[in-house]
Image: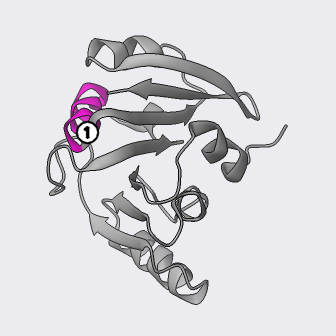
Amino acid sequence: MKNDPIHNVLEFGFIPGQKVADLGSGSGFYTAALSTAVGNMGRVIAVDLEPSSLSRLKKTAMMEGRQNIEVMIGDIERGTSLRSGVLDGAVFSHIFSRLEDKAGACAEAKRIVKKGGKVCLVEKMVGIREVLETSGLVFERAFDAGRGQTGYIFKN
């Protein structure tokens, strides 16, 4: 099975009207799928350190008529300017294994996602479950995310 963002976002279980962050969004591989999942009444905030990636993502979103996507320059390891407890979910796709401060990124996701919300990952990395559980997130389930990767869903 290939790595299919649409399939994986459906597995995450986000629904129309929710507000979700794509943490370390890059050029938005998962942002569009999240945008579709949360619909016009929902919101996707693409957070990345690289302004040029966010600029391309925003341009693509506008061309596709995706008005529920906003972009934000932010450091997902040291803290973003998002308010605490305002999101229904956060997603790390193909970024978590490359982070230097995984505990800091977990803490930031936990801070911005409301109680009962989801923190989701797609990675090949071993030991993810332990890292996130140490931060206080509760493992819900894992699934085959394609191409040797695993999707993880945690509750805040």
| Residue ID at (31%, 27%) | 156
Query: Residue 139: x percent and y percent?
Result: 45, 16
Q: Is residue 67 above or below residue 28?
A: below
Residue 8 vs 141, above or below: the answer is: below
Question: Relative to 43, is 94 on the left or the right?
Answer: right
| Type of amino acid under label 1 | Lys
Mark 1 residue element: strand
Question: How far from the left and from the top, in percent, is residue 36?
Answer: 60, 64
What residue sits right under mark 1 in the picture? 114
Inspect the magenta stretch and tell me whether residue 24 lies in it: no
Q: What scheme was used to colour the molecule?
A: one colour
Question: Which residue occupies 64% across, 37% down?
Answer: 11
Extent of the magenta region: 100-112
Image coordinates for residue 107, horizontal then vertical, percent: 22, 31
Determine which quarter of the picture holds residue 53: bottom left
Q: Residue 51's spot in the image, x, y percent?
A: 33, 72
Quadrant hosting residue 55? bottom left
The secondary structure that dominates the magenta segment is: helix
Query: Looking at the image, which is closer to me, 39 or 148?
Result: 39
Q: Residue furthest right?
A: 1
Q: Residue at x 29, y 30 (%)?
A: 106
Q: Quadrant of the N terminus?
A: top right
Crowding near pointer 1: few (<14 within 10 Å), some, many (20+)? some
